[in-house]
Amino acid sequence: MTLLARAIASGLLAFVILCLGYLYALAFASIRKPRPRSPAQPVHRFAVTIPAHNEEATIGRTVTRLLAQDYPADCFDVFVVADNCTDATAEVARRAGAIALERRNLEQRGKGYALAWLFDAVLAREPRYDAVVVFDADTVVDPAFLRVMDAWLQEGHTVIQGQHVIANPADGWFTAIMYIAFVMDNRLRNLGRSNLGLSSKLMGDAMCFARGVLEQYPWSASSLTEDAEYRAHLLQHNIRVFFAPDARAYGEMVNNLSAARHQRARWMHGRAEVTKKLAPRLFKTGLRNRSWAQVDGAIEQWMPSFSSLGVIAALNTGLIAAVSWFTAHPLPWPWLAALWIGLLAYAPLGLLLERAPLKVYLSLPVAPFYALWRTMLRLRVRAQRNTNVWVRTPRSTEAAPIVAEVTQ
């Protein structure tokens, strides 16, 4: 039994250190921020699309701010699909200046279905659109967003992910932790992958697709994580997602743990579904094509979250200590030190690179409690069934004042 415990402890230690090595390879690749050549003038015409479900309280403000983009007004239009709405989302969007379309299909419900319907409607309506951009209904977009996307499209990229920033980290410990999580996801992993020639993740918001991509590979993703599903589909065809860190969009994160639990549970269900269905196929395709981007796409789906790695490391450290106590075997101090230095330094590295507000650092001591909460939620999700229903996440407060504070 002792020998088995030692084998398990050694295997878990090696696994976590290997995962950390993978994450740090991406992190070191993210130090450099890419800069496009400055084009003389914008050349692309955009269809800016917003899928919305019962968003009458936020959609008007979002549309108004989008129409104020620092981009020629005759080169972009804002479309809103009011999907199975029971409120005045469409009417409010029209009053704000958007082209509002209404969709009602109680059999096919969800953001993925809404996007597929909206993309088809937009591309059929206007043949001059060169690219389609996707935002959430409560997103606050940096005024230069479309100019940045235009520049990278001129560089030859066809699928581009902007940087999604949590707009309200000052609302509480949970929103601050989520701000940190998005920094790790965006700066350390997405930018690292992009700089290495791999494929960044699609984040569901602040996404840009060249028209040709959507025409050749129509959006058919309908899972709870439709962005991850479509990214895997594109990777199957060797189309990579480029990450543009200077194309920034700010979204409000719910600060109510009950609402957050339901939201993250849906994401976890969706991720598990996509991983089971697409990761093995993507891995086999990558080995056959000798494509590191495709292999990495599968590994990213299979790998535990950073929170889960922390919980595994803590439990395994306890196991190692117990085995050492009962067998009088010396602790592997160098490996344990490397493990915990790597875990504890990872988030601060991302915050330093992003020049995050000082107050965000003050939330780092709460991170272990979030990691445990998230891991317990994941275990609970695995034991439950879920349905693909688009449920609007409640907003807490106006995000605009917080955005100004974050961007200072």
Image (cartoon, grey):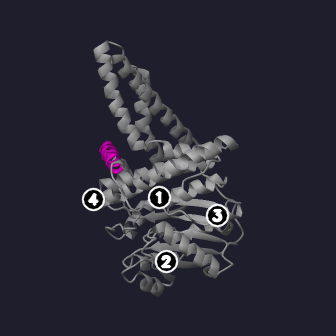
Q: Is residue 82 visible?
A: yes
The quadrant in which the N terminus is found is: top left
- Residue 362's place in the image compared with 246, above or below, is above
Nearer to me, 301 or 180: 301
Separation of marks 1 and 4 at Cα, in angstroms? 20 Å
Q: Position of residue 235 (x, y in %)?
A: 62, 53
Q: Quick one: which residue is furthest to the top in this view?
A: 328
Q: Amino acid at mark 3?
A: Tyr
Which residue is depicted at the point 40% across and 63% down?
405
Q: Which residue is mark 4?
A: 258
Q: Position of residue 311 (x, y in %)?
A: 35, 38
Q: Which residue is mark 3?
A: 217
Magenta part of the chain: 364-381
Q: Which residue is mark 1?
A: 225
Which residue is depicted at the point 38% across and 54% down?
178
Nearer to me, 64 or 121: 121
Separation of marks 2 and 4 at Cα, in angstroms? 28 Å
Q: Upstream in the sequence, badge 2 or badge 3?
A: 2
In the rendered image, residue 276 lying in the magenta stretch gets the answer no
Q: Position of residue 55 (x, y in %)?
A: 39, 76
Element type at mark 4 = helix
User: Callout 2: few (<14), some (14-19), or many (20+) C-alpha neighbours within 10 Å?
Assistant: many
Separation of marks 2 and 1 at Cα, in angstroms? 19 Å
Q: Amino acid at mark 2?
A: Val
Q: Upstream in the sequence, badge 1 or badge 4?
A: 1
